[in-house]
């Protein structure tokens, strides 16, 4: 290692070319680096989503969740299997051991689910297997206002035109819509007419599905030319659909319009979006893993501006963006980087008191940092808070080796009177081992960070790489370039030994006292170390410190059975209260969370949870408000606690707020509920824990239709026919069984139901006609209709039912208090 310094001094051209090449490569790599808030991590986690609109959680648990869990539990590398079940939706999360290839894990789960798909209920939709994206939050949210468009036209404009344009932008992975409606043809049947004519809702739906189709009919050769044959039976207008003839069980037929009303409308909304209390339609932009958050936002904004310029009557307004905080963090990190470098140069000059020696030492910092960017680009590491923190931390260390080298060269020149050239060769060879040992020690300290286990290790591997690579480049600079520059740039002379700063004599006096009183110095050092360790135990601990992002989020949850109108009223109340706060700029709220089915914009909202909402509070710029984000949340939270019937919690985005979560697992649901209630009572007595709740205690009112097997058999009505008719009358048939209406550019579903409000009274539901083998009978003749209460949602962990007890933390972080 010593020979490399003397070789560099004697051969300056190759050394200079080497570092010019490294600098150019580093600058090119810097331009290729992505800029994100946090490093992209690819977790080997896969979700399996199965939707069955209208199915109760208990039915989804037995018929769907257990089947999926048993299929994936035996796969190689599976670490944990959990399922979240709500009405009409089952989401099974399969976590593989870290190190498993995510694509392989996804394919294995997909193959396992395909093998048991035939065991799922016929009414269940096709399972959707998807790899979990760790960067799941949207990077942009826009509101679209179009007074000239109807709600369904605006929704389709976003789903079709806007989504197509934005999905063509590099780095955009998906577009989802918040609010709006899905266009359907609604056939609202009159139950009295059905009963009078002896036809059931199921008969109407099946007739429409079988008659309203366009299908191929084969090929024919006519006049020497081969022609395709098609059967066109689909109605071309709503009026033609209303004239569709329905066969009666007795005799004859009747027009569809005689059984009810046929309207070109939209589904009953189960989601909504509000901006400052005004109902709007919005869309969210998501970025793909491996893309730059800032670049994606810039490109998406440019594309949206272009769409808005071409659109007539549509206005796009940005509501939220994650890029502002990322850009601020990036700028602040770079500012800290160059300020740290400048201060380091100042400190070097303060001690060396030689401008040439100081500049030679200072060159080590940029020539160590810039090549590091080339390595980061080659390893696909982004510029994030983690890597920028690493570079900011190490900036002062990079100059250490160069300082040792140049100081030893200057010392040789002063003591021996040798020329800079000769002193550089001798000094570099003399100090080489110490420089290498210093660098190796730093690498030995930070390199183990790259081998941290678990999720934190996934984040901090980029930290370790950035530190270790830059430090190793600083060693290369110190052993090659610093001796070279010292040999050719440093001049004899400099400041005199007697020309010392005013603080040096005081420092030397303290140093002599410390050496003369060694035992006192030793005990003082031990006491200082022990005191520091004691204070460290009092510090709060958390994975990521809370940051002022200028955006707070609130999760809102109402009691099971709450309607979308009740949720809207609560959201409007929250909005009004928050808008009175001086720090608030705007409030955006979304109501209803549909089960994910792949992230497409046209996913059905039939399984949306209308009792939940997310409120996003955009705060004013820091210069225009007195409170930080955390202070605002602490001040605003008590002002929302008196809203009845709602659980309101800050921190829905996972970046602010905190909570304790304890999961109990067992096969006995009653024992689980009893244990969770006891745990809640205990948690209420723990200081700092507030609002403890349990998922085991959430029940939802149900309307139970219980067939009388004897009467049903006597009248030739099966329970399957009863269930299908009730489902069709209330929410419509399964999506795959619905008839389609051709609009030219797309097909919309024809949904057969009873009008809203007709079945609010169970007595009206009892007269719903059923078609049996012996004719048409009312539902009340073969079934009892009553009320009950069932679980609103279920959670399964390790293939057993579980209950999760959660509590908010009031003024504490995870390292304080106990639970």
Image: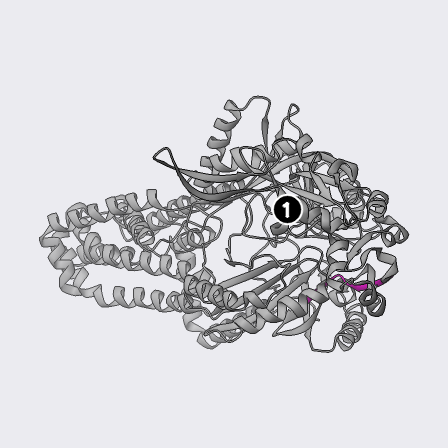
Give the answer, above or below, for where 261 lies relative to 515.
Answer: above
Q: Is residue 359 left or right of residue 689?
A: left
Which residue corresponds to the image point at 69% horizontal and 30% vertical from the top-left?
239
What residue is rendered at 59% in x and 53% in y?
596
Judged left or right of residue 462, residue 750 is right
The answer to whether any part of residue 419 appears in the image is: no
Residue at image mark 1:
209
Q: Residue at x 51, y 23 (%)?
A: 309
Magenta span main SS: strand
At x 46%, y 31%, the residue is: 302
Span of residues in magenta: 787-795
Q: Quadrant of residue 105?
A: bottom left
Question: Could you tell me residue 716's position as x and y percent?
Answer: 79, 63
Q: Quadrant of the C terminus?
A: bottom right
User: Residue 273, located in which quarter of the rendered image?
Assistant: top right
Find the residue positioned furthest to the right.
Answer: 763
777 versus 708 height, above or below: above
């Amino acid at each position: 290692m010593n020979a490399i310094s003397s070789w560099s001094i004697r051969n300056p051209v190759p050394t200079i070319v080497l570092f010019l090449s490294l600098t150019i490569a580093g600058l090119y790599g810097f331009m290729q680096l992505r800029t994100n808030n946090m490093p992209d991590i690819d977790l080997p986690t896969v979700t399996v989503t199965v939707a069955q609109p209208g199915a109760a959680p208990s039915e989804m648990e037995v018929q769907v969740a257990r089947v999926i869990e048993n299929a994936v539990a035996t796969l190689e590398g599976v670490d944990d299997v959990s399922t979240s079940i709500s009405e009409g939706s089952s989401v099974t999360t399969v976590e593989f051991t870290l190190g498993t290839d995510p694509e392989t894990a996804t394919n294995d789960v997909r193959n396992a689910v395909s093998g048991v798909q035939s065991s799922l209920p016929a009414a269940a939709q096709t399972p959707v297997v998807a790899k979990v994206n760790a960067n799941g939050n949207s990077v942009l949210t826009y509101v679209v206002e179009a007074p000239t468009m109807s709600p369904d036209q605006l929704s389709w404009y976003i789903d079709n035109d806007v989504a197509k344009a934005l999905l063509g932008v590099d780095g955009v992975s998906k577009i989802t819509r918040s609010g709006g409606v899905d266009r359907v043809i609604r056939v609202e049947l009159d139950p009295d007419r059905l009963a009078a004519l002896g036809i059931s809702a199921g008969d109407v739906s099946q007739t429409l599905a079988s008659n309203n189709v366009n299908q191929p009919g084969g090929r024919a050769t006519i006049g020497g030319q081969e022609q395709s044959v098609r059967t066109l039976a689909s109605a071309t207008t709503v009026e033609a659909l209303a004239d569709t003839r329905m066969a009666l069980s007795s005799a004859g037929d009747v027009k569809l319009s005689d059984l009810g009303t046929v309207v070109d409308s939209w589904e009953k909304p189960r989601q909504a979006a509000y901006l400052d209390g005004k109902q709007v339609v919005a869309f969210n932009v998501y970025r793909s893993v491996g893309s730059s958050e800032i670049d994606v936002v810039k490109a998406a904004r440019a594309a949206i501006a272009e769409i808005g310029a071409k659109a007539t009557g549509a206005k796009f307004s940005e509501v939220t963006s994650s890029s502002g905080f990322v850009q601020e963090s990036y700028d602040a990190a770079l500012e800290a980087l160059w300020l740290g470098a400048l201060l380091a140069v100042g400190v070097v000059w303060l001690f060396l008191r030689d401008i040439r020696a100081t500049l030679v030492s200072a060159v080590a910092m940029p020539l160590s940092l810039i090549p590091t960017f080339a390595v980061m680009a080659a390893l696909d590491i982004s510029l994030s808070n983690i890597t920028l923190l690493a570079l900011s931390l190490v900036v002062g260390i990079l100059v250490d080796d160069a300082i040792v080298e140049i100081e030893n060269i200057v010392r040789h020149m002063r003591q021996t009177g040798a020329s800079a050239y000769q002193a550089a060769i001798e000094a570099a060879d003399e100090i080489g081992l110490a420089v290498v040992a210093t660098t190796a020690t730093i690498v030995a300290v930070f390199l183990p960070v790259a081998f941290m286990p678990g999720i934190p290790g996934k984040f901090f591997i980029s930290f370790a790489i950035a530190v270790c690579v830059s430090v190793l480049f600083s060693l290369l600079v110190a052993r090659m370039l610093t001796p070279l520059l010292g040999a050719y740039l440093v001049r004899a002379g400099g400041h005199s030994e007697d020309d010392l700063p005013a603080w040096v004599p005081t420092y030397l006096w303290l140093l002599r006292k410390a050496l003369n009183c060694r035992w006192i110095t030793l005990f003082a050092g031990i006491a200082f170390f022990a005191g520091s360790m004691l204070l460290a135990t009092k510090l709060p601990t958390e994975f990521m410190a809370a940051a002022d992002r200028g955006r707070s989020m609130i999760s809102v949850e109402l009691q099971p059975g709450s309607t979308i109108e009740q949720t809207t009223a609560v959201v409007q109340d929250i909005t009004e209260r928050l808008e009175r706060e001086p720090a608030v700029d705007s409030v955006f709220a979304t109501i209803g969370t549909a089960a994910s089915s792949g992230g497409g914009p046209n996913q059905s909202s039939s399984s949306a949870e209308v009792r939940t909402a997310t409120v996003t509070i955009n705060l004013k710029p820091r210069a225009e408000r007195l409170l930080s984000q955390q202070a605002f949340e602490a001040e605003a939270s008590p002002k929302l606690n008196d809203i009845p019937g709602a659980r309101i919690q800050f921190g829905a985005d996972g970046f602010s707020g905190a909570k304790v979560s304890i999961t109990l697992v067992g096969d006995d649901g009653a024992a689980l509920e009893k244990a969770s209630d006891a745990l809640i009572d205990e948690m209420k007595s723990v200081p700092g824990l507030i609002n403890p709740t349990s998922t085991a205690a959430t029940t939802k009112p149900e309307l139970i239709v219980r067939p009388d097997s004897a009467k049903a058999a006597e009248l030739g009505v099966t329970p399957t026919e009863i269930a299908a008719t009730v489902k069709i009358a209330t929410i419509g048939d399964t999506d795959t069984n619905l008839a389609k209406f051709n609009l030219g550019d797309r097909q919309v579903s024809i949904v057969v139901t009873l009008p809203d409000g007709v079945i609010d009274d169970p007595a009206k539901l009892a007269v719903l006609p059923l078609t049996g083998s012996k004719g048409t009978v009312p539902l009340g003749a073969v079934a009892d209709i009553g009320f009950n209460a069932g679980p609103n949602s279920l959670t399964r962990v390790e293939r057993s039912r579980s209950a999760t007890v959660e509590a908010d933390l009031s003024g504490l972080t995870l390292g304080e208090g106990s639970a």
